[in-house]
Amino acid sequence: MGSKYIIRKRENTILYFEFFLTAGIAAILLTVYLKTHPALGFVMYVAFLFLLWFLFFMFRIFRYFFSILFSLGWSGAAFWVGKAIDEKSTITAWVLGVVIFLFAIWAHWDHFTFLKEAKVYEYEKH
């Protein structure tokens, strides 16, 4: 008797967006401050992108470090938006920053637990 499975591809596009964004910012900063040619900046972008990917997926300590760093980045952006919403007080900015930080940490944690607890089913496509 055959088994029935529902296969759903899990996508974590936020993680890859963070890689692309971080590599892009680093390449732009290196190009601007070192005054290098834009082609070299693109090469640095690609190299930094692969370096982030390699460190993130090969070493557990970098997963935690990058997760905290990316979450702090999202929190900082939310804090900035909160300051723009309410210019008289920082309470809105702090609340928004903390909520977004906790959400970002949860999103990274959810991805890690999925990778750790997922069952792998191999099948051959005919």
Image (spheres, rainbow, N blue to C red):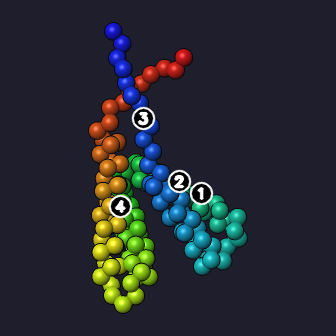
* Residue where numbered disc 1 is placed: 46
Rendered position, 123 above or below 97: above
Compute the Cα span from label 4 to label 2: 22 Å
At x 52% / y 63%, what residue is drawn?
A: 21
Looking at the image, tell me whether mark 1 or mark 4 is earlier in sequence order: 1
* Residue where numbered disc 3 is placed: 8
Residues at discs 1 and 2 in contact (Cβ within 8 Å): yes
Tag 1: amino acid = Val
How busy is the neighbourhood of tag 1: few (under 14 within 10 Å), some, or many (20 plus)?
A: some
**Position of 62 compared to 126: left or right?**
left
* Residue where numbered disc 2 is placed: 50
How busy is the neighbourhood of tag 2: few (under 14 within 10 Å), some, or many (20 plus)?
A: some
At x 40% / y 72%, what residue is drawn?
A: 78
Residues at discs 1 and 4 in contact (Cβ within 8 Å): no
How busy is the neighbourhood of tag 4: few (under 14 within 10 Å), some, or many (20 plus)?
A: many
At x 35% / y 54%, what residue is drawn?
A: 108
Looking at the image, tell me whether mark 4 or mark 3 is earlier in sequence order: 3
